[in-house]
Image (tube, helix red, strand yellow):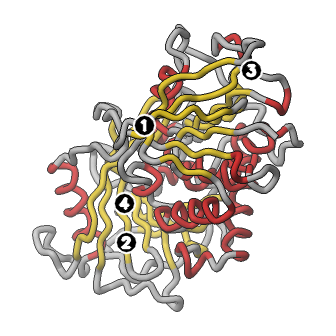
């Protein structure tokens, strides 16, 4: 069985390693991550919202598969207790007119409007007990029962990584990729990496590479194949977030968890608010393509004005009805964050084997080799993670695919 090197220890990378290790010796799988802190970007700072049918046709099969894999993983490994997996009531909160509906599933991403535009339709929905109401507002259920859920993504990532390491998967961290080498036939044979703390260089024999470095996937590709003129069509979408606690939400079983979507001002700011088990509430929605991607995950500088806007939103949505936005009202901010999510021009992820002609290098044919890309999931990385990990493992190992991903192919720039 061929060795496999996975570049990127985020939710997609550890999901791929997890499912690869079901069908090949775990010690033949190597995870490589250059960031000093694991899960320091989108994988650790995402909202953790899961949806079964909020996807365009190209990703619909993958979305349904991944949702069921999340449910099964949680059932098999005490996910509720271990990473906060729970069914979620999803609602749109409108202070005046009902929500608009987009013509395409990724319009909201392009125009900065609400992700609720991707929801399949109206449905009965309970009012979150912690939501501060205003006169004339409307709370509309936007997804049938059993079709949305949520997790704490950082805890899920840690579980998957720990399970991979328990099985015998090798972790190289912090380590950077230096180069590739070929065998006497001119085919991919190894990857050279360097420990970024000690400078020690190691050649990892491998015939398969999985690029799962999120917004840094294009950078990883150029490090591996510096002479290739083409670029991976992966950009970045920056997003600020905060996690708060409120005396109005204790996170108990009897109250039920909610995901609330709303559009808050004339500028199109569309907060996403997720009340998690245990009492935390995640608030995000300030997204930007203008914040440059840092060299490594975790090397970020939060914008004070963005955090201030999220804090104000927290006070308005979580404080007592009619409360003053300048009053804390018992809302405590416990974490502030900025992460970078990988996006593509089409608004859909890419899960594909990269053709040898786009590598400038030969790889072994069939299941014996290849370079694979799984990135560009945008804000759906957590929701699509397990399905992506399973499908890319099946693709790499030459097994039948569990989802139709024919519409998620690669076109080099």
Graded by Cα atoms within 10 Å as few (under 14), some (14 to 19) or many (20 or more), the crowding at tag 3 reads many
Judged by depth in the image, the label closer to the viewer, 4 or 3, is 3
Looking at the image, is 219 positioned above or below residue 390?
A: above
Q: Between disc 3 and disc 1, whose residue precedes? A: 1
**Comes first in the chain, label 4 or label 3:** 4
Secondary element under disc 3, as helix, strand or loop, is loop
Distance between mark 2 and mark 4 Cα atoms: 24 Å
Q: Quadrant location of the N terminus?
A: top right
Disc sitting over residue 363 in the figure? 3
Q: Relative to 175, is 203 above or below?
A: above
Residue underneath mark 1: 200
**Label 2 environment density (alpha carbons within 10 Å; few <14, some 14–19, many ≥20):** many
Of labels 1 and 2, earlier in sequence is 1
Identify the element where label 1 is drawn: loop
Whichever of labels 2 and 4 marks the residue nearer the N terminus, that label is 4
- Image quarter (top left, top right, bottom left or bottom right) of the C terminus: top right
- Within 10 Å of the Cα at label 4, are there few (<14), some (14-19), or many (20+) other Cα atoms? few
Q: Is residue 23 left or right of residue 120?
A: right
Q: Residue at horizontal 64%, vertical 79%?
A: 78
Which numbered mark, 1 or 2, is in the foreground of this view? 1
Residue 256: give x, y in percent of width and height.
52, 82
Disc ID at residue 96: 4
Decide: marks 4, 3 in contact (CB < 8 A)? no
């Amino acid at each position: 069985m061929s060795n496999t090197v996975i570049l990127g220890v985020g939710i997609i990378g550890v999901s791929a390693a997890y499912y690869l290790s079901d069908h090949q010796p775990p010690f033949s799988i190597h995870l490589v991550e250059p960031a000093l802190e694991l899960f320091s970007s989108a994988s650790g700072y995402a909202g953790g919202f899961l949806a079964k049918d909020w996807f365009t046709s190209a990703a619909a099969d993958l979305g349904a598969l991944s949702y069921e894999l999340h449910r099964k993983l949680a059932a098999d490994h005490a996910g509720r207790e271990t990473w906060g997996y729970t069914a979620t009531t999803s609602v749109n909160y409108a202070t005046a007119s009902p929500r608009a509906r987009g013509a395409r599933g990724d319009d909201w991403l392009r125009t900065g409007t609400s992700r609720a535009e991707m929801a399949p339709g109206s449905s009965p929905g309970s009012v979150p007990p912690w939501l501060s109401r205003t006169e004339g507002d409307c709370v509309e259920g936007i997804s049938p029962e059993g079709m949305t859920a949520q997790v704490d993504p950082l805890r899920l990532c840690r579980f998957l990584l720990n399970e991979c390491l328990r099985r015998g998967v090798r972790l190289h961290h912090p380590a950077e990729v230096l180069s590739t080498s070929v065998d006497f036939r001119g085919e991919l044979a190894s990857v050279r990496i360097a420990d970024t703390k000690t400078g020690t260089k190691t050649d990892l024999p491998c015939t398969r590479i999985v690029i799962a470095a999120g917004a840094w996937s294009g950078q990883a590709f150029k490090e591996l194949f510096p002479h290739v003129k083409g670029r991976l069509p992966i950009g970045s979408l920056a997003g600020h977030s905060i996690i708060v606690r409120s005396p109005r939400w204790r996170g108990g079983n009897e109250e039920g968890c909610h995901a609330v979507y709303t559009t808050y001002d004339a500028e199109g700011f569309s907060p996403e608010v997720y009340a998690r088990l245990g009492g935390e509430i995640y608030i995000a929605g300030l997204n930007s393509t203008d914040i440059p991607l840092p060299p490594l995950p975790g090397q970020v500088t939060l914008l004070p004005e963005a955090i201030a806007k999220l804090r104000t939103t927290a006070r308005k949505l979580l404080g007592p009805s009619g409360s003053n936005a300048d009053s804390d009202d018992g809302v405590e901010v416990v974490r502030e964050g900025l992460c970078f999510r990988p996006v593509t021009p089409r608004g859909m992820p890419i899960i594909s084997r990269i053709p040898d002609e786009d590598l400038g290098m030969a790889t072994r044919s069939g299941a014996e080799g290849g370079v694979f890309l799984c990135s560009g999931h945008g804000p759906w990385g957590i929701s699509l993670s397990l399905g992506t990990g399973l499908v890319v493992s099946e693709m790499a190992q030459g097994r039948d695919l569990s989802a139709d991903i024919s519409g998620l192919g690669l076109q080099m720039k």
